[in-house]
Image (cartoon, rainbow, N blue to C red):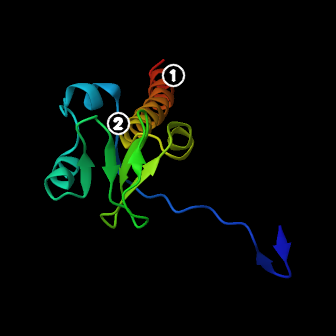
Amino acid sequence: MTFGEHTLRYRRRPIVVEAFQYTETIAKTDNWLGVPPWALKALEKSDMLLNADGELFVKTSEGYPRVSIGDYVIHDANGEMHICKPDNFVKAYIPVNNIEFNSFVDTVADSFQKNLKAWAVDANAKR
């Protein structure tokens, strides 16, 4: 869509965030194994609160909203935490490692294709 000579469409800048999913295992067993260090520090500093019933509360700009089982707690580039519902999280974020891996696979495939063509030319030249 344009208005005069100006385009009115925008794409969100790609940003990398860290996140973990609050699970029943964490809530019921208090097993924080695999939870990122920033989350453990947030617990120590009371930026995240866990009550005796396994309810987790996260300090955000809106106060301390409750994190539901399955929600993601996001730690953004500014050091702020946000809560994100699982369906919104999977729509908005993909694991960075997958992007890096796919990029690597594409690079290897491109290199192989180029080398394959060079090998074919070389093989024909030797005939």
Q: Position of residue 64 (x, y in %)?
A: 36, 57
Using the image, determine if residue 44 lies above or below residue 4: above
Count of number-bearing discs: 2
Point out the frontmost of discs 1 and 2: 2
Is residue 31 depicted above or below 15 in this figure? above
**Residue 113: x, y in percent?**
49, 30
Q: Could you tell me which residue is drawn at 26 percent across and 26 percent down?
A: 28
Distance of label 1 from label 2 (alpha carbons): 60 Å
Secondary structure of residue under mark 2: loop
Amino acid type assigned to the residue bearing label 2 in the image: Tyr
**Coordinates of residue 123 in the picture (x, y in percent):** 46, 21
Q: Amino acid at mark 1?
A: Asn
Taking depth in this image into account, of 46 and 18 the one nearest to the observer is 46
Residue at mark 1: 124
Picture quadrant of residue 22: top left
Relative horizontal placement of residue 114, taking residue 25 as reference (left or right): right
Residue 63, placed above or below residue 75: below
Q: Residue furthest top?
A: 127
Quadrant of res 7: bottom right
Q: Position of residue 122 (x, y in %)?
A: 45, 27
Q: Residue at x 20, y 57 (%)?
A: 46
Name the residue: 40% across, 47% down: 66
> In the depicted view, which residue is nearer to us: 75 or 111?
75
- Of label 1 and label 2, which has the lower sequence position? 2
Report whether 37 appears left or right of 87. Answer: left
Q: Label for residue 22?
A: 2
In the picture, measured across the screen, residue 50 lies left or right of residue 64, that is left
